[in-house]
Image (spheres, rainbow, N blue to C red):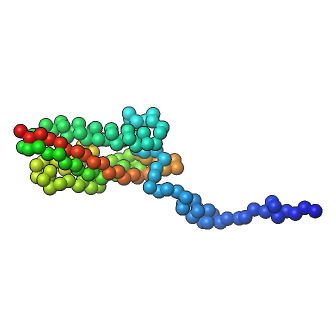
Amino acid sequence: MSSCTYFETKKISSETFLEEELKSINWKDVDQYPVFTNCENISDKLTQKSCFESTLTTQIYQFINSKNIIANRDLNDTVNLDFLVTNTALISVTNIEMDSLLGAAFPQLEKWLLESIDSISVVAPAYKRGIPVNTEFSLPIVIKTQGL
């Protein structure tokens, strides 16, 4: 004798399948980080992130250095820059945290940071499962000067 119970399949509703699939996704991680031109051929995810962050930092420093800032005293402080890369590859600053002494020494610094971010263009946004997504980053910018 034989039975067909071994060939029976359970039917799952599409809502149940969707709920289970959504629970299994790590929403804090992306499959591919935003990309600059010089990072396009990198396939390793951690190397992509490192390339993105170092390129962004380099471009911010170059912009600030172009302002020929003169300091009255020695400073060594960190500005925390929070920004968003949208699913259309646009960068916008969401928050700038800096010490009040640094802000007093360089009243234009926040404006320069915003301008530097506005001048940067990303080739592609981050992707999660083949879909472009918004990503948030926090980047420390070290401001170190030697006074006159």
> Where residue 116 sits: x, y (%)?
24, 43
> Where residue 129 sits: x, y (%)?
52, 50
Q: Is residue 127 left or right of residue 76?
A: right
Q: Is residue 41 left or right of residue 111?
A: right
40, above or below 31, in the image: above
Residue 118 in view, yes or no: no
Q: What's the residue at 19%, 48% (across, down)? A: 77
> Where residue 12 sits: x, y (%)?
67, 65
Residue 116 in view, yes or no: yes
Q: What's the residue at 33%, 48% (across, down)? A: 91
Q: Which quarter of the image is occupied by the N terminus?
A: bottom right
Q: Is residue 110 left or right of residue 124?
A: left
Q: Is residue 48 left or right of residue 62?
A: right
Q: What's the residue at 14%, 41% (across, down)? A: 145
Tally of numbered discs? 0
Between residue 47 and residue 42, name the one nearer to us: 47
